[in-house]
Amino acid sequence: MRHEFIPYAIAFREPVTTGAGRWAERRGAWLRLEADDGRVGLGEAAPLGRVETAASLEEALAQGPFRDAAFDLAELDLEAQRFGRPLAWVLSDAPRAQVAVNATLFAPDARSLAEEAARAVSAGFRTLKVKVAAAAPEVDIARILAVRGRVGAGVAIRIDANRAWDEETALEVLRAVEGCDIEYVEDPVAGDLRAVGRRVNIPVAADPATLEEGERVLRSRGADYLVLKPMALGGLRPTRKLAVAAIDAGLGVVITSILETAVGVAGALHLAASLPGPERAHGLATAGLLEEAPVEGLDPPHDGRMRLPKGPGLGVRLRERTP
Protein backbone atom coordinates (compact mmCIF):
# COMPACT_ATOMS: atom_id res chain seq x y z
CA MET A 1 0.00 0.00 0.00
CA ARG A 2 1.06 3.56 -0.67
CA HIS A 3 0.48 6.44 1.69
CA GLU A 4 0.71 10.22 1.59
CA PHE A 5 0.34 12.80 4.35
CA ILE A 6 -1.27 16.06 3.24
CA PRO A 7 -0.51 18.89 5.70
CA TYR A 8 -3.14 21.51 6.46
CA ALA A 9 -3.47 24.74 8.44
CA ILE A 10 -7.09 25.88 8.89
CA ALA A 11 -8.20 28.90 10.90
CA PHE A 12 -10.83 28.67 13.60
CA ARG A 13 -13.86 30.85 12.88
CA GLU A 14 -13.20 32.43 16.27
CA PRO A 15 -10.06 31.84 18.36
CA VAL A 16 -10.60 28.96 20.77
CA THR A 17 -9.70 29.67 24.40
CA THR A 18 -9.63 27.01 27.12
CA GLY A 19 -7.80 26.42 30.36
CA ALA A 20 -5.08 24.76 28.29
CA GLY A 21 -4.39 27.70 25.97
CA ARG A 22 -5.61 29.74 23.01
CA TRP A 23 -5.56 28.73 19.35
CA ALA A 24 -6.30 30.72 16.21
CA GLU A 25 -5.78 27.86 13.76
CA ARG A 26 -5.59 24.09 13.57
CA ARG A 27 -2.59 22.33 12.06
CA GLY A 28 -2.36 18.68 11.16
CA ALA A 29 -2.33 16.34 8.18
CA TRP A 30 -4.72 14.09 6.32
CA LEU A 31 -3.55 10.61 5.38
CA ARG A 32 -4.35 9.01 2.01
CA LEU A 33 -3.76 5.26 2.16
CA GLU A 34 -4.07 3.68 -1.28
CA ALA A 35 -4.58 -0.09 -1.42
CA ASP A 36 -3.39 -2.30 -4.24
CA ASP A 37 -6.98 -2.58 -5.52
CA GLY A 38 -7.17 1.20 -5.99
CA ARG A 39 -9.36 1.97 -3.00
CA VAL A 40 -8.29 4.91 -0.85
CA GLY A 41 -8.70 5.10 2.91
CA LEU A 42 -8.59 8.41 4.76
CA GLY A 43 -7.09 9.19 8.14
CA GLU A 44 -6.04 12.26 10.06
CA ALA A 45 -3.28 13.22 12.48
CA ALA A 46 -3.90 16.42 14.44
CA PRO A 47 -1.70 16.93 17.51
CA LEU A 48 -3.21 19.90 19.35
CA GLY A 49 -0.71 22.61 20.24
CA ARG A 50 2.32 20.65 19.06
CA VAL A 51 2.66 21.55 15.40
CA GLU A 52 3.53 25.23 15.16
CA THR A 53 5.95 24.62 12.25
CA ALA A 54 6.33 22.25 9.32
CA ALA A 55 9.24 20.61 11.14
CA SER A 56 7.21 19.98 14.30
CA LEU A 57 4.38 18.52 12.22
CA GLU A 58 6.81 16.20 10.45
CA GLU A 59 8.16 15.11 13.84
CA ALA A 60 4.64 14.41 15.13
CA LEU A 61 3.87 12.31 12.05
CA ALA A 62 7.02 10.22 12.37
CA GLN A 63 5.77 8.14 15.28
CA GLY A 64 3.41 8.11 18.24
CA PRO A 65 -0.35 8.01 18.83
CA PHE A 66 -1.34 10.64 16.27
CA ARG A 67 0.35 8.77 13.43
CA ASP A 68 -1.11 5.52 14.78
CA ALA A 69 -4.58 7.09 14.86
CA ALA A 70 -4.28 8.22 11.25
CA PHE A 71 -3.31 4.78 9.98
CA ASP A 72 -5.90 3.03 12.17
CA LEU A 73 -8.67 5.18 10.72
CA ALA A 74 -7.50 4.80 7.12
CA GLU A 75 -7.17 1.01 7.49
CA LEU A 76 -10.68 0.78 8.96
CA ASP A 77 -11.99 2.95 6.13
CA LEU A 78 -10.54 0.51 3.61
CA GLU A 79 -11.87 -2.52 5.48
CA ALA A 80 -15.37 -1.06 5.64
CA GLN A 81 -15.27 -0.15 1.94
CA ARG A 82 -14.46 -3.77 1.10
CA PHE A 83 -17.26 -4.86 3.44
CA GLY A 84 -19.63 -2.46 1.68
CA ARG A 85 -20.94 -0.98 4.94
CA PRO A 86 -20.35 2.14 7.03
CA LEU A 87 -17.25 1.94 9.20
CA ALA A 88 -19.28 1.59 12.41
CA TRP A 89 -20.35 -1.88 11.23
CA VAL A 90 -16.73 -3.03 11.31
CA LEU A 91 -16.65 -2.09 15.00
CA SER A 92 -20.10 -3.36 16.03
CA ASP A 93 -22.82 -5.73 14.86
CA ALA A 94 -25.52 -3.20 15.75
CA PRO A 95 -24.30 0.40 15.63
CA ARG A 96 -26.59 3.38 16.02
CA ALA A 97 -27.45 5.35 12.89
CA GLN A 98 -27.02 8.62 14.77
CA VAL A 99 -25.71 9.83 18.11
CA ALA A 100 -26.52 12.65 20.49
CA VAL A 101 -23.86 15.36 20.71
CA ASN A 102 -23.16 18.24 23.06
CA ALA A 103 -22.63 21.87 22.15
CA THR A 104 -19.32 23.31 23.37
CA LEU A 105 -19.48 26.85 24.74
CA PHE A 106 -16.51 29.22 24.96
CA ALA A 107 -17.88 32.76 25.49
CA PRO A 108 -15.76 34.51 28.13
CA ASP A 109 -18.40 36.37 30.16
CA ALA A 110 -21.66 35.37 31.80
CA ARG A 111 -24.01 37.34 29.57
CA SER A 112 -22.55 36.24 26.24
CA LEU A 113 -22.20 32.64 27.46
CA ALA A 114 -25.87 32.56 28.48
CA GLU A 115 -26.80 33.83 25.02
CA GLU A 116 -24.57 31.21 23.40
CA ALA A 117 -26.25 28.53 25.53
CA ALA A 118 -29.71 29.74 24.56
CA ARG A 119 -28.83 29.57 20.87
CA ALA A 120 -27.54 26.03 21.28
CA VAL A 121 -30.73 24.90 23.04
CA SER A 122 -32.83 26.59 20.35
CA ALA A 123 -30.85 24.57 17.79
CA GLY A 124 -31.86 21.35 19.55
CA PHE A 125 -28.91 20.60 21.82
CA ARG A 126 -29.86 19.03 25.16
CA THR A 127 -26.31 18.83 26.54
CA LEU A 128 -23.96 21.79 26.91
CA LYS A 129 -20.24 21.68 27.65
CA VAL A 130 -18.83 24.85 29.19
CA LYS A 131 -15.10 25.49 28.93
CA VAL A 132 -13.79 26.99 32.18
CA ALA A 133 -10.51 27.89 33.94
CA ALA A 134 -9.38 30.54 31.45
CA ALA A 135 -10.61 33.30 33.79
CA ALA A 136 -10.84 34.06 37.51
CA PRO A 137 -12.93 31.67 39.66
CA GLU A 138 -15.65 34.26 40.27
CA VAL A 139 -16.02 34.75 36.52
CA ASP A 140 -16.46 31.03 35.92
CA ILE A 141 -18.97 30.78 38.77
CA ALA A 142 -21.00 33.59 37.23
CA ARG A 143 -20.76 31.99 33.78
CA ILE A 144 -22.05 28.60 34.97
CA LEU A 145 -24.85 30.13 37.05
CA ALA A 146 -25.88 32.25 34.08
CA VAL A 147 -26.09 29.25 31.77
CA ARG A 148 -28.24 27.25 34.16
CA GLY A 149 -30.45 30.26 34.80
CA ARG A 150 -30.92 30.82 31.08
CA VAL A 151 -31.58 27.25 29.90
CA GLY A 152 -33.50 26.00 32.96
CA ALA A 153 -33.86 22.39 34.01
CA GLY A 154 -33.86 19.53 31.52
CA VAL A 155 -30.63 20.53 29.78
CA ALA A 156 -27.46 18.77 30.91
CA ILE A 157 -24.43 20.94 31.69
CA ARG A 158 -20.86 19.68 31.72
CA ILE A 159 -17.83 21.77 32.62
CA ASP A 160 -14.24 21.23 31.47
CA ALA A 161 -11.26 22.80 33.24
CA ASN A 162 -8.52 21.13 31.16
CA ARG A 163 -6.52 20.40 34.36
CA ALA A 164 -5.96 24.14 34.82
CA TRP A 165 -7.31 24.59 38.37
CA ASP A 166 -5.48 23.82 41.57
CA GLU A 167 -7.47 21.91 44.17
CA GLU A 168 -8.44 25.02 46.15
CA THR A 169 -9.80 26.80 43.07
CA ALA A 170 -11.63 23.70 41.87
CA LEU A 171 -13.39 23.32 45.21
CA GLU A 172 -14.27 27.02 45.31
CA VAL A 173 -15.93 26.94 41.90
CA LEU A 174 -17.58 23.54 42.19
CA ARG A 175 -19.08 24.18 45.62
CA ALA A 176 -20.55 27.42 44.31
CA VAL A 177 -22.30 25.63 41.43
CA GLU A 178 -23.34 22.39 43.14
CA GLY A 179 -26.96 23.51 42.89
CA CYS A 180 -26.74 23.74 39.09
CA ASP A 181 -27.15 19.98 38.57
CA ILE A 182 -23.82 19.59 36.76
CA GLU A 183 -23.56 16.28 34.89
CA TYR A 184 -19.81 16.13 35.50
CA VAL A 185 -16.67 18.23 35.76
CA GLU A 186 -13.92 17.14 33.40
CA ASP A 187 -10.29 17.28 34.52
CA PRO A 188 -10.74 19.85 37.29
CA VAL A 189 -7.12 19.37 38.40
CA ALA A 190 -3.97 17.78 37.06
CA GLY A 191 -3.62 15.44 40.03
CA ASP A 192 -6.00 13.13 41.89
CA LEU A 193 -9.52 13.74 40.58
CA ARG A 194 -11.06 11.81 43.45
CA ALA A 195 -9.47 14.25 45.91
CA VAL A 196 -11.84 16.81 44.41
CA GLY A 197 -14.74 14.46 43.70
CA ARG A 198 -14.94 13.24 47.29
CA ARG A 199 -15.51 16.80 48.52
CA VAL A 200 -18.20 18.00 46.13
CA ASN A 201 -21.52 16.64 44.96
CA ILE A 202 -20.52 16.64 41.29
CA PRO A 203 -19.25 13.57 39.37
CA VAL A 204 -15.74 13.81 37.95
CA ALA A 205 -14.58 12.86 34.46
CA ALA A 206 -11.06 12.05 33.31
CA ASP A 207 -9.77 12.97 29.86
CA PRO A 208 -6.67 10.76 29.65
CA ALA A 209 -3.79 12.08 27.59
CA THR A 210 -2.60 8.56 26.77
CA LEU A 211 -4.10 5.10 26.52
CA GLU A 212 -2.01 3.98 29.48
CA GLU A 213 -3.36 6.82 31.61
CA GLY A 214 -6.91 5.84 30.71
CA GLU A 215 -6.23 2.25 31.70
CA ARG A 216 -4.84 3.43 35.06
CA VAL A 217 -7.93 5.53 35.72
CA LEU A 218 -10.13 2.54 34.93
CA ARG A 219 -8.18 0.16 37.17
CA SER A 220 -8.20 2.60 40.09
CA ARG A 221 -11.78 3.80 39.50
CA GLY A 222 -10.27 7.26 39.57
CA ALA A 223 -13.25 8.91 37.87
CA ASP A 224 -16.97 8.46 37.23
CA TYR A 225 -16.62 9.12 33.50
CA LEU A 226 -13.96 8.68 30.85
CA VAL A 227 -13.83 11.29 28.09
CA LEU A 228 -11.90 9.64 25.27
CA LYS A 229 -10.24 11.26 22.26
CA PRO A 230 -9.34 8.55 19.72
CA MET A 231 -7.00 10.98 17.97
CA ALA A 232 -4.82 11.17 21.09
CA LEU A 233 -5.15 7.52 22.10
CA GLY A 234 -3.83 5.85 18.97
CA GLY A 235 -7.03 5.32 17.00
CA LEU A 236 -10.55 3.94 17.03
CA ARG A 237 -9.73 0.33 17.86
CA PRO A 238 -7.62 0.87 21.00
CA THR A 239 -10.02 3.58 22.17
CA ARG A 240 -13.02 1.30 21.69
CA LYS A 241 -11.36 -1.47 23.69
CA LEU A 242 -10.85 0.92 26.62
CA ALA A 243 -14.35 2.36 26.23
CA VAL A 244 -16.07 -1.02 26.32
CA ALA A 245 -14.05 -2.06 29.38
CA ALA A 246 -15.07 1.17 31.12
CA ILE A 247 -18.75 0.72 30.23
CA ASP A 248 -18.64 -2.86 31.50
CA ALA A 249 -17.17 -1.52 34.77
CA GLY A 250 -20.03 0.96 35.17
CA LEU A 251 -18.28 4.15 34.09
CA GLY A 252 -19.84 6.64 31.73
CA VAL A 253 -17.98 7.04 28.44
CA VAL A 254 -18.03 10.06 26.16
CA ILE A 255 -16.19 10.16 22.83
CA THR A 256 -14.90 13.56 21.85
CA SER A 257 -12.86 15.21 19.15
CA ILE A 258 -9.59 17.02 19.57
CA LEU A 259 -10.87 19.87 17.39
CA GLU A 260 -9.70 18.16 14.21
CA THR A 261 -11.35 18.37 10.79
CA ALA A 262 -14.34 16.35 9.59
CA VAL A 263 -12.12 13.37 8.67
CA GLY A 264 -11.17 12.67 12.28
CA VAL A 265 -14.58 13.71 13.59
CA ALA A 266 -16.31 11.27 11.23
CA GLY A 267 -14.13 8.46 12.56
CA ALA A 268 -14.95 9.37 16.15
CA LEU A 269 -18.63 9.50 15.22
CA HIS A 270 -18.50 5.94 13.87
CA LEU A 271 -16.81 4.88 17.11
CA ALA A 272 -19.44 6.57 19.27
CA ALA A 273 -22.21 4.90 17.25
CA SER A 274 -20.61 1.50 17.84
CA LEU A 275 -20.55 1.63 21.64
CA PRO A 276 -22.83 -0.54 23.78
CA GLY A 277 -24.71 0.68 26.82
CA PRO A 278 -26.86 3.74 27.43
CA GLU A 279 -26.75 6.55 24.92
CA ARG A 280 -24.76 9.61 25.94
CA ALA A 281 -24.11 12.93 24.24
CA HIS A 282 -20.66 12.90 22.67
CA GLY A 283 -18.33 15.83 22.05
CA LEU A 284 -18.34 15.71 18.27
CA ALA A 285 -20.16 18.86 17.14
CA THR A 286 -16.85 20.63 16.58
CA ALA A 287 -15.96 20.56 12.88
CA GLY A 288 -17.97 23.76 12.43
CA LEU A 289 -15.55 25.63 14.70
CA LEU A 290 -13.11 25.62 11.78
CA GLU A 291 -13.27 27.65 8.60
CA GLU A 292 -14.33 25.58 5.61
CA ALA A 293 -12.02 22.63 4.98
CA PRO A 294 -11.87 20.61 1.73
CA VAL A 295 -13.73 17.69 3.32
CA GLU A 296 -17.17 16.54 2.15
CA GLY A 297 -19.69 14.08 3.52
CA LEU A 298 -20.16 14.91 7.22
CA ASP A 299 -23.50 16.55 7.94
CA PRO A 300 -23.68 19.20 10.69
CA PRO A 301 -25.66 18.47 13.86
CA HIS A 302 -29.44 18.59 13.64
CA ASP A 303 -31.58 18.83 16.77
CA GLY A 304 -28.56 17.93 18.88
CA ARG A 305 -27.77 14.75 16.97
CA MET A 306 -25.35 13.70 14.23
CA ARG A 307 -26.01 11.05 11.60
CA LEU A 308 -23.33 8.70 10.35
CA PRO A 309 -21.99 9.71 6.94
CA LYS A 310 -23.62 7.93 4.02
CA GLY A 311 -22.01 5.21 1.98
CA PRO A 312 -19.47 2.49 2.73
CA GLY A 313 -16.35 3.18 4.75
CA LEU A 314 -15.69 6.42 6.58
CA GLY A 315 -18.12 8.23 4.32
CA VAL A 316 -16.17 11.47 3.91
CA ARG A 317 -13.77 12.48 1.17
CA LEU A 318 -11.26 15.18 0.36
CA ARG A 319 -12.20 17.47 -2.49
CA GLU A 320 -9.86 17.19 -5.43
CA ARG A 321 -6.96 19.59 -5.22
CA THR A 322 -6.58 22.01 -8.10
CA PRO A 323 -3.10 22.48 -9.58
Image (cartoon, rainbow, N blue to C red):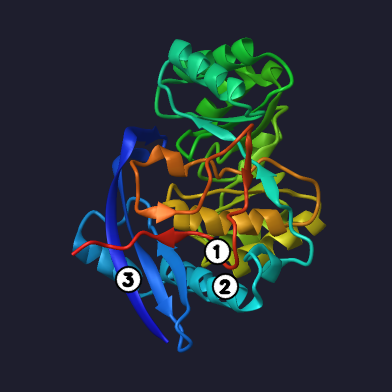
Q: Amino acid at mark 1?
A: Leu
Question: To which residue does mark 2 refer?
Answer: 76
* Image position of 199 with respect to 307: above or below: above
Q: Secondary structure at mark 1?
A: loop
* Image position of 251 with respect to 47: above or below: above
Question: To which residue does mark 3 refer?
Answer: 5
Q: Depth check: 180 or 215 in front?
A: 180
Q: Look at 81% across and 58% down and name the residue there.
A: 248
Q: Amino acid at mark 3?
A: Phe
- Pick whichever of labels 2 and 3 is earlier in the sequence: 3
Can I make out residue 223 in this image? no
Give the quadrant of the C terminus. Answer: bottom left
**Residue 215 placed where, x, y %?**
64, 62
- Pick whichever of labels 1 and 3 is earlier in the sequence: 3
Q: Nearer the viewer, mark 1 or mark 2?
A: 1
Q: Are marks 1 and 3 in contact (CB under 8 Å)?
A: no
**Residue 217 placed where, x, y %?**
65, 55
Q: Are marks 1 and 2 in contact (CB under 8 Å)?
A: yes
Q: Look at 57% across and 56% down and name the residue there.
A: 268
Number of numbered discs visible in the structure rendering: 3
Q: Depth check: 56 or 87 in front?
A: 87
**Residue 293 placed where, x, y %?**
35, 49
Q: Quadrant of residue 112?
A: top left
Residue 13 relative to residue 219: left or right: left
Give the quadrant of the N terminus. Answer: bottom left
Q: Look at 45% across and 89% down and name the residue there.
A: 36
Q: Which mark is residue 314?
A: 1
**Residue 82 placed where, x, y %?**
60, 79
